[in-house]
Image (cartoon, helix red, strand yellow):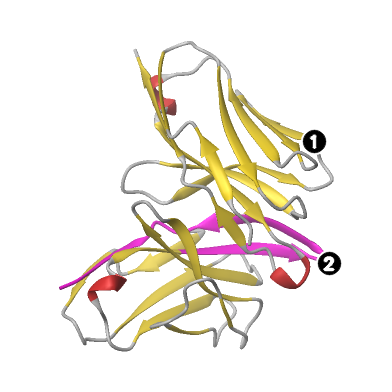
Amino acid sequence: KQEVTQIPAALSVPEGENLVLNCSFTDSAIYNLQWFRQDPGKGLTSLLLIQSSQREQTSGRLNASLDKSSGRSTLYIAASQPGDSATYLCAVGAGGTSYGKLTFGQGTILTVHP
Amino acid sequence: NAGVTQTPKFRVLKTGQSMTLLCAQDMNHEYMYWYRQDPGMGLRLIHYSVGEGTTAKGEVPDGYNVSRLKKQNFLLGLESAAPSQTSVYFCASSLVSGTVTYEQYFGPGTRLTVT
């Protein structure tokens, strides 16, 4: 059974700092990996999707990398801002007959203070 | 383009009552999913559908039923609600092209309390 772990569980940083969120998974036979953002009381917003054949994806100040062989992904946030404060979720996708089902980590709660 | 919408946003039920949660997407996505989110447990898959008229069980299907009569709608039913079903329910959908499954888009959630 796939298990996804996110470290740290919570992170508090001053504005402007570059930071890294970590995600690890136990079964390297994944189809894709998706990073989400969740604001309190809201739904999930997709940030980046990395297919299993890719090593990284970038969107603005966000960069996500994937190392399937070691079962790891990182989300890099450059020049953090207070508006980045949210919970960040990593989810691993299963392909083939698993039809894209996602297994989620518990999330990292990020607070960026001015 | 509204994306994924969920109805209702909030609901309070008494133990034993029934209800249906509605999910609708206007992106012509083939795959649709129902998750529940609980503190300390994260998001867990309840049921999913890979096309109109098809449904399948996820990780925590007990106590729930689903139907996908139209491609754009995915319904989640609770026949006899229990306090353990107090949770936030999220619907999601994704596009499929050949063997490639793309990112999942989530609705805003339904907050359900069973007393």
Q: Decide whether residue A44 is among the magenta residues.
A: no
Q: Quadrant of residue A64?
A: top right
User: Which residue shows up at 69% across the image and 38% down it?
Assistant: A72
Q: Report in which chain the residue with disc 1 lies.
A: A
| Residue in the image at 71% along x and 53% along y | A27
Q: Which residues are magenta?
A: B91-115
Provide the residue designation for mark 1: A55
Q: Main secondary structure of the magenta part?
A: strand
B78 vs B40, nearest the viewer? B40
Chain at numbered mark 2:
B
Residue hosting label 2: B98
- Image location (x, y in percent) of residue B81: 26, 81
Answer yes or no: are tags 1 and 2 on the same subunit.
Answer: no
Say which element carries label 1: loop
State if disc 2 and disc 1 touch (CB < 8 Å).
no
From this view, report whether residue B101 is shown above or below residue B18: above
Locate residue B103 relative to residue B111 in the image: left or right.
Answer: right
Residue B58: x and y, percent?
55, 73
